[in-house]
Image (cartoon, grey):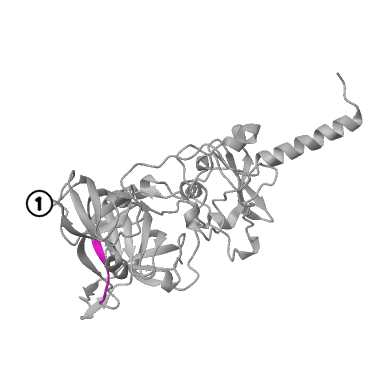
């Protein structure tokens, strides 16, 4: 059967409308400057990576906020990595940082040279199977999506979970922090619910027992908590004041009955729960997608602690910084770690000479509180230590 011209025009318009509706819900942009990290699904402190829904509600999805790089903001040519490819096929498990490192000497410059290809459905997202290419526009290198993977161009794209898109960092890189390490700001620690007593004739509490807790009056039964013992204080090396505490993970519990005191059942413990231990909501909001960038203000801080208790800090370890939102830091900010110079003896002229600080690695800030923040060591050119400096990238 053949269609007349009017029928063809009508069919074409309907097809365009259907395709537009198909992709309306796929609007998450890993390069966008999200102002609400809570839009990222929280990950549990004691579990592996959380699963994602396979459906998208297009009726409530926000309008796309396209990332439009200001090409004129690049004050100097962005250095390319030695041996960089001209094309790269995105693999499952890649992160934006990993991919950027294949093209660029400094991966965090990625957003500055990303070039949106308007001919590709969801050009702001990168999926496994996409082909990225290095092109030159006005003499400047740009990275763009030159060929999208097959599935994202099909009508089934509307039911593809957004979690399939490549994230800035991987869940695995911070899983150790979520499961074993926690740092509490001083004011936060003082305001948390605490273990009042153990139900029954028990001096200490362990898995299978119930505890009485104060500070959970408005919590709902079934809510889950991590029990944390307050450890050593975190001392800001600049002010010599206590800004927080090392948290020692004790176990997990579920609220059985509200009130004051409330009753919590201990479901899992690795050590005895003691009176005074604090309860932290189990879900910790950790964004995995953000725009890597230099801080908006001048940062000159220090590494106060490292999750895991090691003395030498390497790649993909989580560090605690003595700078936070009050200093202008935000999630996605990139800092350079400097190994502190040491004092040496001058055997020629005599006396002592202080050696300069040396660049030791790159730290990506991923969780910010008022006065402290968490950073992930993305690169380490030499061992990094507690009290080493962190500053704006050069």
- Quadrant of the rendered image containing residue 383: bottom left
Magenta stretch, residue numbers = 241-246
Which residue occupies the foreground of this view, 46 or 275?
275
**Which residue occupies the extreme top position in the image?**
1
Query: Mark 1: which secondary structure?
Result: loop
- Quadrant of the rendered image containing residue 227: bottom left
Label 1 belongs to which residue?
A: 202
Q: Is residue 97 left or right of residue 343?
A: right
- Quadrant of the rendered image containing residue 393: bottom left
Which residue occupies the foreground of this view, 221 or 128?
221
Q: Is residue 94 left or right of residue 26?
A: left
The image position of residue 357, as x and y in percent, is 33, 70
Q: Residue at x 78, y 36 (%)?
A: 14
Q: Is residue 240 left or right of residue 48?
A: left
Q: Residue at x 28, y 52 (%)?
A: 226
Q: Is residue 310 visible?
A: no
The image position of residue 274, as x and y in percent, is 15, 57
Q: Residue at x 26, y 61 (%)?
A: 260
Q: Is residue 345 left or right of residue 371?
A: left
The image position of residue 193, as x and y in percent, is 27, 61
Which residue occupies the foreground of this view, 179 or 39?
39
Question: Alpha-carbon neighbours of circle 1 within 10 Å: few (<14), some, or many (≥20)?
Answer: few
User: Is the magenta region chiefly helix, strand or loop?
Assistant: strand
Is residue 102 located in the magenta-colored stretch of the structure?
no
Q: Taking 330 as reference, is 41 above or below it? A: above
Q: Is residue 55 visible?
A: yes
Q: Taking 15 as reference, is 352 above or below it? A: below
The image position of residue 220, as x and y in percent, is 35, 52
């Amino acid at each position: 059967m053949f269609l007349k011209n009017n029928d063809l025009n009508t069919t074409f318009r309907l097809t365009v409308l259907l395709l537009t509706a198909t992709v309306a819900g796929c609007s998450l942009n890993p390069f966008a400057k999200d102002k609400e990290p809570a839009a990222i699904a929280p990950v549990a402190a004691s579990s592996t990576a959380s699963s994602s829904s396979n459906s998208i509600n297009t009726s409530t999805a926000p309008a796309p906020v396209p990332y439009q790089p200001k090409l004129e903001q690049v004050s100097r040519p962005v250095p390319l990595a030695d041996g960089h490819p001209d094309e790269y096929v995105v693999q499952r498990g890649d992160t934006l940082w990993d991919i950027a490192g294949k093209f660029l000497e400094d991966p965090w410059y990625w957003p500055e040279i990303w070039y949106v290809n308007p001919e590709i459905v969801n050009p702001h997202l990168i999926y496994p199977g996409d082909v990225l290419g290095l092109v030159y526009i006005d003499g400047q290198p740009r990275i763009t999506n030159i060929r999208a993977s097959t599935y994202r161009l099909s009508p089934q794209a509307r039911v593809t979970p957004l979690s399939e898109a490549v994230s800035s960092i991987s869940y695995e890189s911070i899983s150790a922090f979520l499961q074993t390490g926690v740092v509490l700001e001083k004011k936060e620690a003082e305001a948390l619910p605490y273990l009042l007593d153990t139900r029954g004739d028990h001096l200490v509490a362990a898995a299978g027992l119930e505890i009485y807790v104060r500070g959970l009056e408005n919590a709902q039964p079934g809510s889950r908590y991590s029990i944390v013992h307050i450890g050593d204080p975190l001392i800001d090396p600049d002010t010599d004041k206590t800004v927080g505490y090392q948290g020692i993970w004790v176990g997990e519990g579920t609220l059985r009955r509200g009130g004051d005191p409330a009753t919590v059942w201990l479901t899992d413990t690795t050590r005895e729960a003691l009176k005074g231990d604090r309860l932290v909501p189990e879900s910790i909001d950790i964004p995995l997608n953000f725009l890597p960038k230099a801080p908006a203000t001048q940062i000159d801080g220090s590494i106060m602690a490292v999750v895991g208790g090691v003395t030498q800090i390497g790649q993909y370890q989580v560090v605690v910084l003595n700078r936070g939102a009050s200093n202008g830091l935000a999630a996605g900010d990139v800092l350079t770690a400097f190994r502190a110079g040491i004092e040496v003896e001058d055997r020629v002229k005599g006396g002592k000479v202080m050696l300069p600080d040396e660049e030791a690695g790159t730290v990506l800030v991923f969780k910010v509180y008022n006065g402290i923040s968490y950073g992930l060591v993305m690169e380490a050119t030499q061992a990094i230590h507690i009290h080493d400096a962190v500053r704006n990238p050069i």
